[in-house]
Image (cartoon, coloured by chain):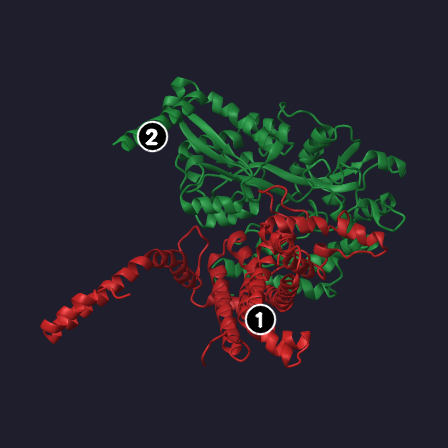
Amino acid sequence: MKRGAMFLTVLALVFAAGAGGVKFQGSAEASAQATTITVWLPFGGRELGVMKRTIAEYDNKNSNVKIKVAGDISTTKIVAAIRAGNAPDLAMDFESANIGTYCSSGAWSDLGPYLKKDKVDVNIFPSAARYYTQYKGKRCAMPLLADVAGLYYNKKMFKAAGLTRPPRTISELTAYAKKLTKRNKDGSLKVVGFDPFIGWYTNSNDRFIGMFGGKWVDSKGKSILAKDPAWAKMLRWQKSLVDWYGHNKLVKFHAGEGDEYSSSNGFESGKLAMNLDGEWRVAFIAAEKPGLAYGTAPLPVDDAKPGLYGSSALNGSIAGIPKNAKHKDQAWALLKYLTTQDHPLAQLSNGLRNVPTTKSSLASPEIKPDKHFSVFLKIYAHPKSSTVPITAAGVQYQDLFTSFVTKWQAGHAKDLAGGLKKVDKQIDAQLKQAGGGVP
Amino acid sequence: MSLVSPMAEAGAASVAPAFDRRRAKKKAAWRRRRIVLAFMSPWILGFSIFFGYPLVMSAYLSLTHYDLLSPARWVGLGNYRYLFGTDSQVWPAVRNTLWMIGVFVPLNVLFAFGIALMLARARTGSGFFRTAFYLPALAPPVAATLGFVYLLNPATGPVNSALEYIGIEGPLWFNSPTWSKPSLVLLGLWGVGSVMIIFLAAVLDVPRHLYESAELDGCGPLRRLRWVTLPSISPVILFAVVIGVIQGLQYFTQAYVAGNIAQGEASQAGDTSGLNLGYPEDSTLFYPVLLYQHGFRYFNMGYASAMAMLLLAVAFAVTLVIILNSRRFVHYQGAVR
């Protein structure tokens, strides 16, 4: 009996504490009816703080909701939560290639009815952003900020080497890279002019092929890495530069580099004279190395395709409402606010220095002018900027190609044409398999 | 212990007819079965829920296309055909796994046995040395791997710095396709403690009189090791080999962590775009790593289940082969054959 009474007392105290917790978090009146919605974001650290501040602004204006934000969320976690039935009301993923998985499986809700009801015209987004937020015509995500790649260059090192402007073509980039590289007495690399190693930091296949204007698939969705000569051209150039540094010397140099997303990043610490990086680096440098004299420019392009200059491969972050979200209407209201309104997009862009994703927000007067960042806004708006193909298999085809490229750049895959053909065959088979078909 | 009292049994036998006796016996047997079942029930429940059910489901899912999110769709043997015929990553992954088993398991047994032999002979400070050799086994695998990646960092790691000091240019360790697996073997051997402790117990358990008899027969230390110690501890060697092979087939955590950290990933949880499992150059792409990649990166769970079924079949077959062959060289003390 005594025990029972004690148990009840503890239970009452727990409930009282819980109720108290709710009460203190918002205004007493509002919290009585406020719906709590959960938002999962892939950001961490400083960037998560920026997202939280923007979301808090919405939270404060809308007394009917209370928003709980969690950061450092990966795709695996989102899928596991949807599967387990405890999905958040709103989820964001850095990797737009996952839209195929989310849409084809129905894991993220079809936003069509919401868009129709609220008369949201998706043409407020540029075509690439419209492309990577749907799969086979079903729109189950909204674009929430985008990433493009550009060239960062160290002005002090340029001056010392007698270089006055950033390189615009691949041959210029190669010459500059060699000129800016410094070696230690033992032959190891001290400063790398431009690091061509795919798979390191932000260097990825899609960003490199953007400089050569290559295509992943043909109109039927078949892999054309061997057929499109841009791939072989890019890989030959990239390997020749890797060989110039020495593959193992570059690997050793990487091992001594700091974490990409920290102040010991190679470009920020002056070990890279030029670097391919995303627009977000502008914010990282402002926060971590404000005194660094640097410039930003579009990535150099294939000498034979000067029309590509100013464009880049772009990759957007996507946000959607999981199929088993508990408060879909409230989640949609927040999603609509974050992805279609200029104000939050500008706020996020200012804090994260990510590219805002509506056409109008690109020119929003709220966006803090910044000569480093404005370069990326232009790259995003460039008509030749494009994104990777969306497939039901997510990023599988990119992984397969990366697997080949790592061997190629190390000199362990001699037959380039044969190797690319094999990768094509494998990608086609894998796409078929991932779609449930028997290859 | 009989559950029916002997007194009652004797009384019943003198008065009751034969069928009554049988009935009583049957009843007792049922009661005994029920008790046994009751005692076993926690294990039976655990086994059915956490092993039996997943096993059956995984076998079923291996015949379907299943992305975790939408209902599974029957594809028959499609996943197996892809596994055996098309997937170009399977055989490199199998080769890596076999390499690990072929190199690591014998070395692990040799090291564990060698250390156990030395510890068994230690006259002073044996407690200290036992603890010292066992301690690494307590380190969580992720932490131990992080530590090794740091120690073996080709540019900033203390190992290469020390090598450089004596004029040797150290290898690229986890960053080299040639050295990544040997680095993982080093990491494994460092944590040899748990197997070593079993060997130590077995070595200490070898009856003294066997050594004395061998010595009287003129056996030197090497022959005593060959003809007394080895046969006496052979069941432990068998155990270490079987466990080693099974662990080798399931080798995942260390490879996954080392590959990611050495390539400089894992800084932002949500950013996996550049993730290259099996880094460098697929040299640490072990079968379970590939399985994980299909299951949890591509959400191709049907195919991952097919891979898991193959792994189960191989583990079962290899263990069976080892155990069947072991009769020729494993000696059980006091066993009557």
The image shows residue B223, relative to residue B255, as above or below, that is below
What is the x, y in percent for residue B104? 63, 65
Query: Disc 1 designates what residue?
Result: B208
Q: Is residue A34 visible?
A: no
Q: Classify mark 1: residues with Cα within 10 Å, few (<14), some (14-19) or many (20+).
A: few
| Badge 1: chain ID | B
* Colour of chain A in the image: green
Give the spatial CA distance, label 2 vs label 1. Answer: 63 Å
Q: Nearer the viewer, residue A332 or B275?
A: B275
Residue at (59% x, 29% y) in the render: A50
Query: Disc 2 designates what residue?
Result: A11
What is the x, y in percent for residue A332? 45, 33
Foreground mark, 2 or 1?
A: 1
Tag 1's secondary structure? helix
A261 on left or right of B46: right
The image shows residue B159, relative to residue B74, as above or below, that is above
Q: Nearer the viewer, residue B67 or B3?
A: B3
Q: Is residue A11 visible?
A: yes
B228 on left or right of B68: right
What is the x, y in percent for residue B46? 37, 56
Residue at (81% x, 45% y) in the render: A192
Tag 2's secondary structure? helix
So how many labels did they put on this image?
2
| Badge 2: chain ID | A
Which quarter of the figure has residue A363?
Answer: top right
State the quadrant of the N terminus of chain A: top left
Q: Amino acid at mark 1?
A: Arg
* Colour of chain B in the image: red
Residue at (68% x, 75% y) in the render: B222
Which quarter of the figure has residue B59?
Answer: bottom left
Q: Are marks 2 and 1 on the same chain?
A: no
What is the x, y in percent for residue A288? 71, 31
